[in-house]
Amino acid sequence: MDNQITLQELNSLIQENLQLSFPDQIWVTAEIGELKVNRNGHCYIELVEKDKQTDTILARSRATIWAWQFRFIKPYFETTTGQALTSGINVLVSVTVEFHNVYGLSLNIKDIDPAYTLGDMARKRQQVIDRLTEEGIIEMNRELEFPDIPSRIAIISSPTAAGYEDFMNQLNANRSGFQFYTKLFEATMQGNDCSASITGALDFVYAYEDLFDVVVIIRGGGSQMDLSCFDDYNLAAHIAQFPMPVLTGIGHEKDESVADMVAFQKLKTPTAVAEFLIERMESAEDNVNELEQLFINEVNELLSREKQRVEDATRLFKPLIKSNIDRNLYRLGNLGNRVKPLIGDIIEQEKFVLSNHAEKLKNIASSNIKDAKNILQELTSETVYLNKMTNRNALQNLTEKKQKLKHLSARTFENELHKIDWLERNNKLIDPKNIMKRGFSITMKNGKAIKNASQLDEGDTIENVFYKGKVKSVVKRG
């Protein structure tokens, strides 16, 4: 074939055509896919373009910033943007297109526009804020109720961070001597792995959420370029939806990250976070002391009021008791005056009964004595007669008569004694006091004893006098 050329010839043609097509520098927008700096100070970058919907790589090209240029471009970019020149950011770079026979096509970066990156960062940040707002979660953490006593603290930080040490010193040396329980959940606080590391730590805290009152995310100092991960959507969404209050103290004052925006409370430094928690504890202590004092005052006031009420009641009660006692004594006196005549009548009645019994006893005794006299007279007559009889028969008969007289007299007197004893017992039994002692009572109306129910009408007030005491009642017909 006549049209054959060598590879070198082909590459030379490509080089000549590229130089003709791209004689000057061209501004190109792309994302830094990879970035490496070798020991000579040369920076080797892979520039990529991705599909905005699928994140698929649409184009890729190698680029180089030679060491003498990199020494100026890097600090200029980072100082202006506050963002590290690293992979994952979009840049606007001025490049020359070069083709090397051995190394192929490459772009030499001559300049970089920080304004484009700033605008892109701001655009992405705003997109994250808009997405959180549309999803309705941007305010969720700030709407949580902060605990009255935030003494159990989950800390997300690097264990070697100066900010972590400052936080712990401030917390443990607090002026009020409060005791805090803290647990560190380690995380990377800058760089490309920052967002994933912090969200992973939040997941660990969530697994033990019942053990903590609040979460703090802290780091110490650092440049603005180290903080870009705190604008990440996944990290912000985790913080916004976390079920307990999240405090941030990530050490920058000028700009507010999205993580700060969604947290319950943003504070400037880790030390400020510690002071915030201490002040909350002091506020809770003040509230408790105030409530305690209010309670003591209320109790003292209540006791004072009740003491006064008791004293007032005592002053009123004494004359009332005296009046009641006087009234009852008067009523008892009236009752005694009414009962005395009644008792006197009962005693008179019983005396009359006893008198009748005594008269009967006297008559019985007289009759028995008379009979005894008659017998004695008969014995006397018989004795005269017996004297005329033989001594033996007379003595025998006399002995029999004496025995008979003795037996008859003894029996007669014994019977009379029994009768007298029976009468005495009977008199005691019918004594009104003994009768009332056995449960009987005297029913009275208007001071007179009632002996028949026909003497009472329905509605009459009657008094029942017992052995001890009395009661009043109203008559009802059954």
Image (cartoon, helix red, strand yellow):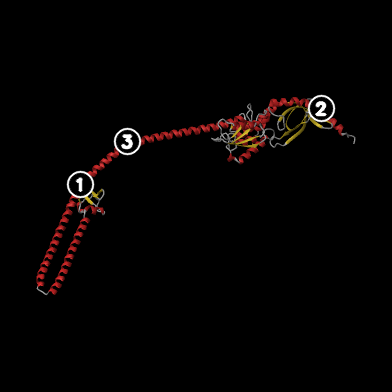
Distance from disc 3 to disc 1, alpha carbons, whole Å, reads: 36 Å
The numbered mark, 1 or 2, whose residue comes first in the sequence reads 2
**In contact (CB < 8 Å): disc 3 and disc 2:** no
Residue 279 locus on image (x, y percent): 55, 31
Upstream in sequence: badge 3 or badge 1: 3
Q: Residues within 10 Å of mark 1 (few under 14, many from 20)?
A: some
Badge 3, how many Cα within 10 Å: few under 14, some, many 20+?
Answer: few
On residue 384, the disc is none
Question: What is the C-alpha distance between the residues marked 1 and 2?
Answer: 149 Å
Between 264 and 297, the one nearer to me in the picture: 297
Determine whether, in the image, residue 390 is placed left or right of residue 314.
left
Residue 338: numbered disc:
1
Q: Residue at x 38, y 35 (%)?
A: 307
Residue that mark 2 sits on: 19
Vertical position of residue 359 compared to residue 130: above or below: below
In the rendered structure, are the residues bearing label 3 and label 1 in contact, judged by CB atoms less than 8 Å apart?
no
State the image quarter where residue 181 is shown. top right
How far from the left and from the top, in percent, is residue 306?
38, 36
Number of labelled discs?
3
**What amino acid type should be assigned to the residue bearing mark 3?**
Arg
For the residue marked with disc 2, what is the amino acid? Gln
Which residue was labeled with disc 3? Answer: 315
Camera-nearest residue between 172 and 157: 172
Residue at image position (36%, 36%) is 309
- State which quadrant residue 374 falls in: bottom left
Comes first in the chain, label 3 or label 2: 2
Is residue 446 visible to us here? no
Query: Considering the numbered disc 3 on the image, is that residue within a helix, a strand or a loop?
Result: helix
The image shows residue 442 at horizontal and vertical percentages of 22, 51
Q: What's under tag 1, amino acid-wise?
A: Arg
